[in-house]
Amino acid sequence: MSSKKVVAILFGGVSAEHDVSVVSARSVTGSLDRDLFEPVFVGIDKQGSWHLGGGAFDLLETGASDDVDTVILSTDPARPGFLSLKTGNVTKVDVIFPVLHGPRGEDGTMQGLFEICGIPYVGCDTMASAIAMDKDMTKRVLAQGGLPVVKGVCVSAWVWKTEQEEVLDEIAETLEFPVFIKPNTMGSSIGISKADSVDEMIRGIDLALQFSPKVVIEQAVPNAREIEVSVLGNNEPRASTPGEIIPCNEFYDFEAKYVSTATELIIPAKLPRQFLDDIQFTAVEAFVAIGGSGMARVDFLVGSDGHFVNEINTIPGFTSVSMYPKLWEASGLPYGTLITTLIELAFKRHEELEALTKTITLEKRLGV
């Protein structure tokens, strides 16, 4: 790149993962190559308003409103960037780096907005983001592709409210305790619980439905080991060395991820070489199956019966202790170089999309 590109770091958001997003964005900002890129900061508060400026982090963390301007995305392709609601001026940007986790950030809605505005952006596109955010849909797509997933049942809030006994019968016919209950569209282990009885499962479903309109109830993998793989690339994605999570709690819940310092990260994972190769291969296959591009972290559960794809995170955590960058560092790709690579991948994908034919010439005028 011959000149500096303006990179908008977009963070915060209206999901329950707002605070995690802010921490991740600070890490990305600190590792951005300032010789190549000029950052602008856009924080989305918990009410959904967008604020541009050097004070965006302070606004989201403390409420201070200095050095910020309320903005929206410009839909004018001749002026790509953020439109000030106060002045009408546009702060032009070349690419957006969304560091947003959870609904309305990682689920394809934001990616669709970037597409409409014609601005390159880091990470998976609208379709892949939407699939990966929906745990039930992810399982369906991967299973159709012959990839290993854990047995599970998906239940909507409406069905749970109106047909609870039928739902419990279906679960009893399909799964055995213990089971895990998860909000269908939530990350960071928010709202997840483990159940060893019907009463615990009912409480877990009620809890999960506070965060998502659907829940997934999954068969627990006995003595499961949690293995994670980072995937990077567009047309030729590659996998990092796998790492293992040894949570301080019974499972890798929110506290074990972000609060406690007792959780262990083992990189590389201590598994036989052939097994690690198989997991890396499956990670790339899962990424390709959902139509991934840019990046994703693929999480596995490994038990005596083999390995299972647990989740695909299209905007994985980027904090100083997050597995996605740590796995690439262990694979020989430093944090700063990783950030640069992701931005370059965003430009490459945008160029490919722009090269597609958008109009056709008709020999005859179409009748109405």
Image (cartoon, grey):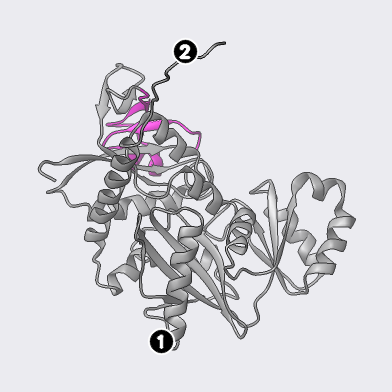
Identify whether 79 is placed above or below 228. above
Residue 289 lies within the magenta run: no
Residue drawn at point x = 42 percent, y = 79 percent: 277
Give the SS element for disc 2. Answer: loop
What segment is highlighted magenta in the picture? 46-75
Quadrant of the image occupied by residue 67: top left
How far is the residue under mark 2 from the one under mark 1?
63 Å
Residue 52 lies within the magenta run: yes
Seen as rendered, the residue at the extreme top is 368
Q: Position of residue 348 (x, y in %)?
A: 28, 46
Viewer-proximal residue among 269 and 127: 127
Disc 2 marks a residue whose amino acid type is Arg
Give the SS element for disc 1. Answer: helix
Residue 296 located left or right of residue 219? left
Residue hosting label 1: 273
Confirm or deny contact between disc 2 and disc 1 (CB under 8 A).
Answer: no
Which of the marked residues, 2 or 1, is nearer the chain's N terminus? 1
| The label number, if any, that marks residue 139 in the structure image | none
The reply to whether residue 289 is in sight is: yes
Residue hosting label 2: 365
